Image: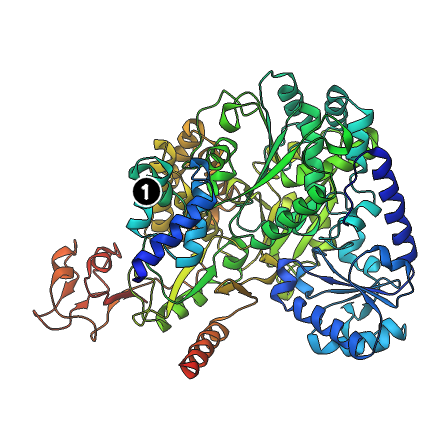
Amino acid sequence: MSEKVMNRQEFDALKTSAEADLKLSEGRPSVLICAGTGCIAGGSLKIYENLKNECESRGLHVHVGLTQESHEDHELHIKMSGCHGFCEMGPLVHVEPQGILYIHVKPEDCHEILEKTVLGGEVIDRLVYKLDGVSYPRQQDIPFYKKQKRVALENCGECDAEDLREYIAKGGYQAFEKALFEMNGEQICKTILDSGLRGRGGGGFPAGRKWESVRRNVADIKYVVCNGDEGDPGAFMDRSIMEGAPHCVLEGMMIAGLAAGCAEGYIYVRAEYPLAVERLRTAIRKAEEAGLLGDHILGSDFSFHIHINRGAGAFVCGEGSALTSSIEGKRGMPRIKPPRTVDQGLWAKPTILNNVETFANVPQIILKGADWYRSIGTAGSPGTKTFALTGNVVNTGLVEVPMGTTLREVIFDIGGGIKNGKKFKAVQIGGPSGGCLTEEHLDLPMDFDSLKQVGAIIGSGGMVVMDEDTCMVEVARFFMHFTQNESCGKCVPCREGTKRMLEILERIIHNEGTLEDLDLLESLASTISETALCGLGQTACKPVLSTLKYFRNEYLAHVVDKHCPHCNGKKKGLVIDPEKCKGCTKCARNCPVEAISGEVRKPHSIDQDKCIKCMSCMKNCPFGAIREE
Amino acid sequence: MDAKTAMLNRAGEIIDSYGSKRENIIAIMQDIQAEYKYLSGDVLSLIAEKLGIGVAKVYSVATFYENFSLEAKGRHIIKICDGTACHVRKSQPIYDAVYKYLGLSGKRKTSDDGFYTLETVACLGACGLAPVMTLDGEVHSKMDPDAALALLENLKKEEGAAV
């Protein structure tokens, strides 16, 4: 697209011509290759290249985007799409018009796909998804997709993530156009409020209320900030949206800007998501070139600019005030609230701060109305929620379901149950800030409020499934290790408290804990959750509390029986490498229990019966001769 | 021009390209680190001078974020994901195997020959392919200890042949 659209008429003309292109291309063969991080890691870029080469060698006329020339007769469309969500089966290749989905495709399969399916209309059974002996050649029939309802992910996997023209042809930027010319700020805020859209980042705060507060605040400049710092280990829905539908995020932010009178937008993206940064940058550039972003958009008084900030590896920056201080170029540490972000956010100005998925929901709400959105999901939590389904489950991937769907439906119907025929034990929802749910919760409808009641949260939507072989104490230790590591150190309860909790958990894991330790864990947990400065500390104890509640017997196995059936019972021991040890005696002098012996200048050794694994020898050895085994 | 002066000159260019603005300090450090893999003391002083803030302020930002390294790293960087999904699907044995293969000990993360640096990362968001590791930024999926070691062997052989 080279022409800049200057006003509403020109935008409508662009829309009409893009739609016409799309209509013409429909029914023609096209191949969509998933280019999400997962499938790229599986080699999907090579598949794309191979397929293009195959076509060229056959002299086929190929189009790699929705261009104006596609009015001309062409034989094939090849597109790189966003994440299809079925990451376990990647790399994925989708063939239209038949709607066939091929899984685990290899670059060498391209020839066959082109010859047999694209040109011959024949299905290659070898590449088709199968379950219980039944083949599912069409994507929409696959059980993984059948129960899903895609709103935030609507454009992910269906169109070319980098093609602005295709996004417009599929209704993109129409919500923005409507908001710009037909609605005022108050009406936009009211629509979002009426829709019941709640923040998808974890808190579940009504987005409309946030917007309305910022709108009412008077300031010389206000900001829109999009939180793409998806730090929860095991969550990747925001990454997929930013990679697969970057324009959708931009459009949501622009509507927020319109609603509250903001002229500047920032997207804060995790450093670990380079592809998302690249796609967002391209999207911003294309939107600017098309005149949809910048000064006096479509000839109106509205100007809006979007900047990208890359995170630098700090989980705590997902917290609102930490995120804004990181954008300002400071240490990303939370501050005391109030003042809230809506009053004093970025550079102490009123700021709308929402998460990627929240913004991705906005365009459709504006276009289809609050009532439409309310018709999906539950009364208290309308709409859909994306979950990243991972762990010991058959179909890992990205799932979007209406709020109120039960865990059983997500894990068993969509996720295909537990890997290797094992039994389901628990699911961890909401990452390090969330809790574990067990078999008794499988039929619980998942929404913000009902999960809160049982001690878990929806959080950002990470869902890690654990089978019968998993030790839940180890899971609690893993999350505590994570939060302890990520604690920013500003407030004492979190900095010191999580460290003590981690020490206790490690003691228990090594079968050295006592029953008093369990009480101590509970009392520390309640102190930290009441006194920590920000959400990171306040929720850090949730995994411990919920595993203590539902899997106390596993703690008891470690504490009382001194033998956990899940952790193969073997304790790690410290050994001295005789080749590296110079016999300096430093370790022996440091050992608090005199477990190390040996002659000067000769290799020392550790008495495993005496050793308490305090690691002081390992930390102090100048030659790095001591290791865990 | 020696390597140190060249690095400082290049760092100066990067700082200028961001208009020497204080709020861009993280982006500036990211760009410098992308080229030199770490931030030396001289570089931090230069940033402080050019942005007109104290060295302590620059140091405080550099040490806060996990991505910044104040020490030189090996030629190739291995990152093993220890996010929840990878952890549940056994990423620790991969880490242990690589750790042993590189002959590391204690907090030392770079092999003696300076060829590899081993790190962990909290989550790459490629949970569907767990366990994953990256070698110089390229994601390798569904790893196990043997596959990881084979990958490292291979690169070493390739580079050995090239030299």
Percent x, y of residue A224: 61, 31
Q: Which amino acid does label 1 sit on?
A: Tyr
Residue at 16%, 56% in the rendered image: A591
Image quadrant in which the N terminus of chain B is located: bottom left
Q: Residues within 10 Å of mark 1 (few under 14, many from 20)?
A: some
Q: Which of B50 and A473 is in front in this view?
A: B50
The image's colouring method is rainbow
Residue at 40%, 69% in the rendered image: B98
Vertical order, A182 against A313 (above or below): above
Q: Is mark 1 on a helix, strand or loop?
A: helix
Tell me which chain the residue with mark 1 is part of.
B
- Quadrant in which residue A341 is drawn: top right
**Number of numbered tags placed on the structure image:** 1
Residue at 45%, 56% in the rendered image: B34
Q: Which of A42 and A566 is in front in this view?
A: A42
Q: Which of B146 and B74 is in front in this view?
A: B74
B63 relative position to A83: left or right: left
Percent x, y of residue A297: 73, 33
Image quadrant in which the C terminus of chain B is located: bottom left
The residue where tag 1 is placed is B59
Percent x, y of residue A574: 27, 64
Vertical order, A575 against A463 (above or below): below
Vertical order, A457 against A80 (above or below): above
A497 relative position to A90: left or right: left
Residue at 55%, 20% in the rendered image: A343
List the single residue furthest toward the left.
Answer: A600
List the single residue furthest toward the bottom.
Answer: B161
Percent x, y of residue A392: 59, 59
A528 relative position to A366: left or right: left
Query: Does residue A445 appear in this view?
Result: no
A378 relative position to A75: left or right: left
